Image (tube, rainbow, N blue to C red):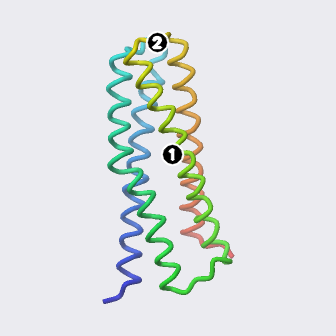
Amino acid sequence: MNWYLILKFTHILFAIVMIGGSMSNGMMELKLRKKSKLIDRHEIFIVMKQVHLINKLLVLPGIIGLLVTGLLIAYIANYPFTIFWVITPLLSMIVVFFLFFIGKKYEDRLKYQAFNNEQIERLYKTHRAVTIIGFSASIVILFILYVMIVKPT
């Protein structure tokens, strides 16, 4: 049994799951953003519950799985951690973890504010932060994909 190929296949599956979950979250939050000032608090609460569920079931396991399988692949293939395309995605995944937990904090706050009928200005301010963090995480994820596919030296 070739462990390298099994791990690489699993690694790619985790990438698909994580990116798919992230994009789904982004599309749902973008839909809320496009509604402008006609946002219903109940709709915000429902969307943020779904985002939380996708984060819990897809995005976080995808991030953890990518990190674990990536480290195992590097170990099995004897890739030194001094190679640019090995260390850069590893460090970038730390940034993705950081952005994930900051974004989760803001998403939870937005859900709480919508549920407790907070002022609409606070909802918009928090939603703007969620959008910025989500966009930043997407940029880092695309950078990781680029580095892993191109493998620049």
Query: Label 1 near label 2: C-beta < 8 Å?
Result: no
In the image, 87 versus 145, the foreground residue is 87
Q: Position of residue 112 (x, y in %)?
A: 42, 23
Which quarter of the figure has residue 83? bottom right
Element under label 1?
A: helix
* Residue beneath the point at 69% across and 76% down: 153
Element under label 2?
A: loop
* Residue beneath the point at 36% across and 64% down: 13
Which quarter of the figure has residue 7? bottom left
Q: Position of residue 97 (x, y in %)?
A: 53, 52
Q: CA distance from mark 2 to mark 1?
A: 24 Å
Q: Earlier in the sequence, mark 2 or mark 1?
A: 1
Q: Position of residue 43 (x, y in %)?
A: 34, 20
Q: Quadrant of the N terminus?
A: bottom left
Q: How many marks?
A: 2
**Residue 118, disc:** 2
Q: Position of residue 90 (x, y in %)?
A: 58, 65
Decide: is 81 above or below 34. Answer: below
- Amino acid bearing label 2: Glu
Decide: is 108 above or below 3. Answer: above
**Residue 100, disc:** 1
Which residue reaches farthest bottom?
1
Q: Residues within 10 Å of mark 2 (few under 14, many from 20)?
A: few
Quick check: 98 left or right of 65? right
Q: Residues within 10 Å of mark 1 (few under 14, many from 20)?
A: many
- Amino acid bearing label 1: Phe
